[in-house]
Structures are given as C-alpha cells and as structure tokens.
Image: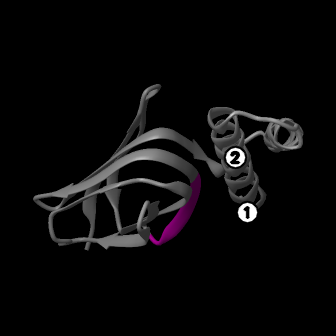
Amino acid sequence: MTFHLQIVTPDGLAFEGEADKISVRTQEGIIGILARHIDYVAPLGMGEAVITVDGVNRRAACIGGMVAVQNGAVRLVATTFEWAEDIDLERAREAEQRAREILSRENLSERDLKLAEARLHRALVRQAVGERK
C-alpha cells in the first residue's frame, strides 16, 4: 500500500510520487509514516530522511521545515533537502571545519555561537547521509 508524497524546498520540487514509507526527524524525534497515517503536522529538525519507493530506500539530508499528512497524502516542505547522491562530501567537510574554527574563537556572541553550532550540525548531518549513499 502506498501514499502520495510531495517534497518541496525553496529551490523547487525535490520529489513527487507514490511512496511506501517515509522516515524523517522532527523536532520531537524520528517519525515513520506509512499509508493511511492519521492527519499530522510537525516541524522538522535536522537529520536523515529515508524515503522508500517500490521497496528501495533513498536517503537525504533534511533540515528544517514542516511535514504534514492530510487525507492520506504527505507533504514535506523542507528548508534544505539534499539526496545522498547529490551531497558533495568535500564541501560538507569544509563547512564542518569552518564551523569548528568559529566555535574555537573566544568571546563569541550568543547569536554567533548558535549560528556556528547550527552550521556544524548541518555539516555533520550532510556528511553522515552522504557517506551512506
């Protein structure tokens, strides 16, 4: 049994079609959605999304946004959604290094600290997903 899944980002449509399952990190933890799921809305966290289509898993780095289930259809609106095979691991490692360099500085403002921590987390998520392609 499948359900309609649409994944959109500010850059456009990342996926639209029938899916068997989706697993994604919300701000409250990882959720799995199958066909006939109850209506549901949640803010997304930073983590790996796994989309199963025809029994085959595809992985992606999914960062921020919302996931909604309405009348059996799922819509994932992500700030960033990057399929594992599209992740540039070298670029992700460089982003990690830059974030760590910022975090090593003294007297960071609270804002700069939070931004650097978010950049580090994003870089680590992208690397973890990209390495599992």
Neighbour tally class for label 1: few under 14, some 14-19, many 20 plus, Cα within 10 Å: few
Residue 44, given in percent of the width and then of the height, sits at: 42, 53
Q: Which mark is residue 38?
A: none
Q: Which residue is mark 1?
A: 132
Residue type at tag 1: Arg
Identified at 27% across, 67% down, the residue is 2
Q: Quadrant of the N terminus?
A: bottom left
Count of marks overlaid on the render:
2
Q: Quadrant of the C terminus?
A: bottom right
Q: Which residue is mark 2?
A: 117
Numbered range of the magenta stretch = 55-60
Cα–Cα span, label 1 and label 2: 23 Å
Q: Is residue 13 magenta?
A: no
Q: Position of residue 56 (x, y in %)?
A: 52, 67
Q: Quadrant of residue 52?
A: bottom left
* Residue at 58% over, 58% down: 59
Q: Secondary structure at mark 2?
A: helix
In the displayed structure, does residue 121 sit left or right of residue 54?
A: right
Q: Nearer the viewer, residue 74 or 62?
A: 62
User: Closer to the observer: label 1 or label 2?
Assistant: 2
The three-letter amino acid code for the residue at tag 2 is Glu
Whether residue 53 can be seen here = no
* Residue plotted at (46% across, 72% down): 55
Query: For the residue carrying disc 2, how many other residues have a C-alpha within 10 Å: few (<14), some (14-19), or many (20+)?
Result: some
Q: Nearer the viewer, residue 97 or 54?
A: 97
Disc nearer the start of the sequence (1/2):
2
Up-down: is 65 above or below 18? above
The percent coordinates of residue 41 (x first, y second) are 24, 57
Q: Main secondary structure of the magenta part?
A: strand
Identify the residue at horizontal 89%, vertical 43% (top origin).
104
Residue 102 seen: yes
